[in-house]
Amino acid sequence: MENAALDATGMAYVSGDCDRRSDMREDAPAIAALRGAPDARAVVIARDQAVLRGEGESAAALHGIDQAAAIGAVRLEAFLGLTPAGAPRFAFWLDDGAVEMREDASDGFLDRRALVVPGRTDLRLADLRSLAMKGAFDPPTLSMIATAKALISWHATHGFCAKCGAKSHAAAAGWRRECAACQTQHFPRTDPVVIMLVSDGDHCLLGRQARFPKGFYSALAGFLEPGETIEAAVKREVLEEAGVLCRDVRYLASQPWPFPASLMIGCFASASDRALTIDHKELEDARWFSRAEVRQMLAGDHPDGLASPGKMAIARTLLQTWSDA
Amino acid sequence: MENAALDATGMAYVSGDCDRRSDMREDAPAIAALRGAPDARAVVIARDQAVLRGEGESAAALHGIDQAAAIGAVRLEAFLGLTPAGAPRFAFWLDDGAVEMREDASDGFLDRRALVVPGRTDLRLADLRSLAMKGAFDPPTLSMIATAKALISWHATHGFCAKCGAKSHAAAAGWRRECAACQTQHFPRTDPVVIMLVSDGDHCLLGRQARFPKGFYSALAGFLEPGETIEAAVKREVLEEAGVLCRDVRYLASQPWPFPASLMIGCFASASDRALTIDHKELEDARWFSRAEVRQMLAGDHPDGLASPGKMAIARTLLQTWSDA
């Protein structure tokens, strides 16, 4: 699925427009010069959330470089690339201590329990899911925040060399970690996940996990394992979770899913029969839905109040594409 | 691309037929019972190579469990699943010290410099590329060896917790590592790689790295980065390596590539123009090839001796599919 078609779906995190300029990542003086440019801006991440300026509709995710550095102690600066207009973009990762949890804060972006920057009422924090659901930012900005979040989550959980146990350090403008003890280079991790809409004629298979909101059903999904093709992973997951053999796997689209660092690979597949054997460790329920019922769920007027994922999720793109066919 | 079509391409590592039975991985008594079954067999891996019984055409990759355990000290046993006939399959990872490098060994499977099991002239070691190129095993067995190799390479490079630096230990029958110090669970890593055949009308773009054999050209490829869709990664890599803008990215097939643990995601893309700006840090050369020339390369009768990847590689599937179109 091409960019224009992807944008039309409303899927979140798919519309990055930065030129990443990976060729510059090793060139510290050039990166420093870009950092000093008047149009340089930074996305600021603390404890997996984005630090925003201002409130509600007018909130902004981009901070001037000096302003970003003044929010709190910076653990890492990563170079994200240049905008189509050539403006440098960075990701700043703040020390956990720069923010704290408050029980009483609440506004359009925040739950009752929320992270705040102490003493800075001009700043708010928001998690990536909320930003996507609220459509708070233009799609390229949301993609940039997602890239920053995925990259920084990796640094946050990979401070040590997995090969020898020594502390590792960031390199290549935030795109690599290196171990001085054993010389191993480590690169950001992205986990491929298959997510598939299995259909049989005019019906498709959806499931729900116990943690989902009441009445909410989505496409089945699971991590691809070593030694598997995308197609094999789709078949294995559907067989494991629902007991359904499927065939004719067709790729539709992919989506970065920065929770913490997945790549959702969206596919269709055809079921060989409709008998279900549900793995209740994975799914609370799974069942076949008619096309008419799926259309009601997408429109939000299902008579039993059943619901499906919002536009931010690739599951909805699969459902919408199938129900339109 | 479906299984039957994949098998017809000759692509390596794509034809796994084990039921992985991930539901059994936490059930140590059940795994132990399977291990004791008379039809249980193990793939044996040492220093990233497979230990084979016998020589040349009659070499076998599967060992009886007791025989496998007697080859050398076993660092890890992983449960790979059940064959279609229900026979249990395991991967055994041997201590590095169980094998040693010999300068003089040489036979159909071996280079002049080769790993051997000291004192065991009935055993040979072979790397996964050689096994694939020689078509030494039936495709499901080769896939099983590839899964074992990818899984064990991960253990071999992830003995420590990346989050806290403490030693981690294997769990879930070899499909997880756990850190007793900080309780983090770690799962096998698979790195998505995009590999793409870019075309413009009757010509396609191929490149060669300096390390390739003389006259050898292949499809461009590169690692997908955090925050990218498959389509965005294809466009970025082609722009970075060859200076070509492309559009209309179409997924064709995927292939596990256990060197050490990639997932090759094969795509077509259309070039917006043919002007090239080659990144000579990545590529020694890149140029446009006519369909007639590609057919000669695939047939092995190019007048200048130019060559393209063998059937084991997804690059050839892309080239073959394009040249047949």
Image: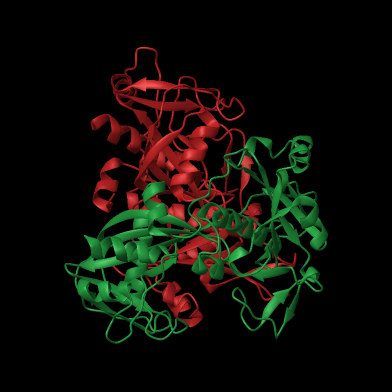
Chain colours: A green, B red
Q: Residue at x 31, y 73 (%)?
A: A299
Depth order, front residue of B163/B29: B163
- The answer to which image quadrant residue A222 occupies is bottom left
Q: Does A292 sit left or right of A98 as displayed?
A: left
**In the rendered image, the vertical position of residue A141 relative to residue B107, given as above or below:** below
**In the rendered image, the vertical position of residue B163 relative to residue B224, given as above or below:** below
Depth order, front residue of B90/B151: B151
Q: Residue at x 51, y 33 (%)?
A: B239
Q: Does A78 sit left or right of B269 as displayed?
A: right
- The answer to which image quadrant residue A278 occupies is bottom left
Depth order, front residue of A144/A119: A119
Q: Position of residue B299 (x, y in %)?
A: 29, 24
Q: Position of residue B37 (x, y in %)?
A: 39, 74
Q: Does A218 sit left or right of B85 as displayed?
A: right
Q: Position of residue A187 (x, y in %)?
A: 64, 50
- The answer to which image quadrant residue A167 occupies is bottom right
Depth order, front residue of A271/A147: A147
